[in-house]
């Protein structure tokens, strides 16, 4: 038996659930079903990310989406409360601190002009001012730093679950099954999805919000999009000599980033991901944690930055997947020109959590009204690749 809906969303993470919630909140009355294969979200990219948010980008659209995201997170506890239960998401604004040599600082300073024009509270710091924020750091090699005052973290799993709860309460159906293929009429109209169980769900609108799996699922309908899974690793360490105060999220031009959480420090590195194009035919969903990479590549850079990292114990860690747009590392948002009713909200390449609230709102507008109202995300259309209008973001981490 074929089940019919007005709109299908493939994927149930932050993008899918923000979209589902915003559709209903904004007045969409059609039937909506969300397909998520991982009921517990064990391998979903949303809960495996840092939960960081920042407004320090070079592209106006990225700044605008992230800026709206910060405002939504700031008011989330009260505005998303249900039955007198506050929507607690562990929202913290401890700032993002970018350490820079001469070359990096030149780029950051240029970007500050765009950021300030859009109302971002960003500060240029001398090495001495930088050291005052984190006294334990060695700043002798720095030319300066940039501080994103309103940057911070929230709990990504909690944010996701609140979106899911609201979407369900507003009538969105969640089906925890794996989508095997997106179906079309064989010409230029999307028709629905087929599950691994063999069941078919039909709808004239299908949204691909499958994150790291979105490139793979799109290929089942004969349409390739430039999104592949890319593994990113996160480490949690205990320091023999802890930082004396909670520290901001520090991004080092040497290639590491870290942020203090009490007696522990969360650590990551660039791992070359944003400069490396994966095999375009490879869909490798790898969740293994490479501890030797931390010992051999990451730890020496940390110790170079602060003696507090000389002695540490690597505790837990985990790996998650970027929905990596291997062409220009930015989101792919909007309808697909070659398939009526097919929409994309993917390819965020590490920006997804912080931009999810805004992207969901905007795609809701596009589906309901045929245009954007809150933020014009037209530049993020997949059409940009054919038109050679790439979005080259210089502040990618």
Image (spheres, rainbow, N blue to C red):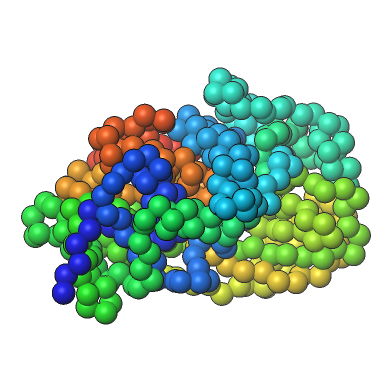
Q: Which residue sits at x=34%, y=40%? A: 27
Q: Nearer the viewer, residue 268 or 336?
A: 336
Q: Is residue 85 above or below residue 328?
A: below
Q: Which residue sits at x=91%, y=60%? A: 241
Percent across and percent down for residue 233 are 60, 64
Q: Nearer the viewer, residue 279 or 250?
A: 250
Q: Which residue sits at x=36%, y=45%? A: 23
Percent across and percent down for residue 337 are 20, 43
Report the label total. Answer: 0
Q: Residue furthest front?
A: 83
In terms of image quadrants, where is residue 22? top left
Observer able to see residue 381: no
In terms of image quadrants, where is residue 155? bottom right
Relative horizontal placement of residue 247, taking residue 96 as reference (left or right): right
In terms of image quadrants, where is residue 219? bottom left
Observer able to see residue 129: yes
Percent across and percent down for residue 271 are 58, 58
Relative horizontal placement of residue 224, taking residue 15 as reference (left or right): left
Relative horizontal placement of residue 167, taking residue 319 as reference (left or right): left
Q: Is residue 131 above or below residue 188?
A: above
Q: Which residue sits at x=79%, y=29%? A: 126
Percent across and percent down for residue 159 are 56, 53
Q: Nearer the viewer, residue 370 or 126?
A: 370
In what quadrant of the picture does the N terminus appear? bottom left
């Amino acid at each position: 038996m074929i089940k019919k809906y007005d709109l299908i969303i493939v994927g149930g993470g932050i993008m899918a659930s923000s979209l589902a919630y915003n559709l209903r909140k904004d007045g969409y009355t059609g039937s909506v079903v969300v397909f998520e294969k991982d009921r517990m979200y064990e391998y979903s990219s949303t809960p495996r990310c840092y939960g960081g948010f920042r407004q320090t980008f070079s592209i106006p659209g990225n700044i605008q989406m992230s800026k709206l995201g910060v405002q939504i997170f700031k008011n989330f506890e009260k505005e998303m409360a249900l039955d007198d239960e506050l929507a607690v998401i562990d929202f913290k604004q401890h700032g993002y601190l970018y350490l820079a040599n001469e070359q990096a600082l030149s780029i950051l300073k240029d970007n500050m002009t765009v950021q300030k024009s859009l109302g971002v509270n960003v500060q240029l710091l001398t090495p001495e001012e930088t050291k005052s924020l984190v006294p334990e750091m060695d700043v002798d090699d720095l030319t300066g730093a940039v501080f994103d005052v309103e940057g911070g973290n929230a709990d990504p799993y909690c944010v996701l679950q609140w979106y899911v709860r609201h979407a369900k309460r507003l009538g969105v159906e969640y089906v925890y099954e794996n989508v095997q293929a997106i179906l079309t009429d064989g010409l230029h109209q999307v028709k629905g999805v087929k599950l691994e169980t063999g069941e078919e769900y039909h709808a004239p609108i299908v949204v691909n919000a499958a994150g790291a799996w979105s490139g793979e699922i799109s290929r089942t309908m004969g349409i390739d999009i430039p999104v592949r899974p890319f593994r990113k690793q996160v480490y949690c360490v205990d320091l023999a000599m802890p930082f004396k105060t909670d520290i901001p999220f520090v991004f080092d031009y040497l290639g590491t980033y870290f942020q203090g959480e009490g007696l522990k420090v969360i650590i990551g590195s660039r791992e070359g991901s944003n400069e490396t194009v994966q095999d375009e035919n490879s869909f490798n969903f790898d969740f293994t944690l490479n501890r030797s990479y931390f010992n051999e590549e990451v730890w020496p850079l940390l110790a170079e930055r602060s003696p507090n990292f000389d002695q540490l114990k690597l505790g837990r860690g985990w790996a998650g997947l970027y929905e990596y747009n291997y062409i220009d590392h930015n989101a792919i948002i909007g309808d697909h020109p070659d398939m009526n009713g097919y929409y994309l909200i993917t390819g965020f390449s590490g920006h997804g959590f912080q931009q999810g609230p805004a992207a969901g709102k905007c795609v809701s507008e596009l589906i309901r009204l045929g245009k954007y109202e809150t933020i014009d995300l037209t530049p993020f259309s997949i059409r940009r690749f054919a038109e050679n209008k790439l979005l080259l973001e210089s502040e990618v981490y």
